[in-house]
Amino acid sequence: MKTYTFYDDSWYDQPPCDCCQGGWMWSYNSDQVSGNFGSASSEEDCHLQAIATEMGYEYCEDFPDTYRLMEYSDLKKVADLLGIKVEVVS
């Protein structure tokens, strides 16, 4: 089984002024997927990027929307069917 490893590069975004509240910016990156995908913003996005890579897609725009509309549990099943595992390292 092939493992796609994503690293948690999340950070706290401090606003430039006192009138706004900052927030946590979720960001996950992997050197095993196409750089054209950009950072994933959730573990679900990590699965989408790994599945797209395994299926031979290089760009998010080309990846079918049917996968983006799937529940997280269904994405995990697709990953299992493709023989891949997604690991997120903090």
Image (tube, rainbow, N blue to C red):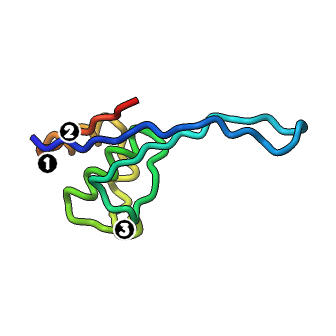
Nearest to the observer: residue 81 or residue 49: 49
Q: CA distance from mark 3 to mark 1?
A: 19 Å
Point out residue 60 in the picture as x, y percentages from the top left corner. 39, 64
Q: Amino acid at mark 2?
A: Lys
Judged left or right of residue 62, residue 23 is right
**Residue occupying image coordinates x 24% and y 44%:** 4
Q: Which mark is residue 82?
A: 1
Q: Estimate how packed mark 2 is, as few (under 14), some (14 to 19) or many (20 or more) residues with alpha carbons within 10 Å.
A: some
Point out residue 61 in the picture as x, y percentages from the top left corner. 41, 68
Q: Is residue 29 above or below residue 60?
A: above
Q: Which mark is residue 35?
A: none
Mark in the foreground, 1 or 2: 2
- Local SS, label 3: loop
**Residue occupying image coordinates x 87% and y 42%:** 17
Residue identified by numbered label 3: 59
**Residue occupying image coordinates x 34% and y 34%:** 88
Q: Estimate how packed mark 1 is, as few (under 14), some (14 to 19) or many (20 or more) residues with alpha carbons within 10 Å.
A: some
Q: Amino acid at mark 1?
A: Leu
Q: Estimate how packed mark 3 is, as few (under 14), some (14 to 19) or many (20 or more) residues with alpha carbons within 10 Å.
A: some
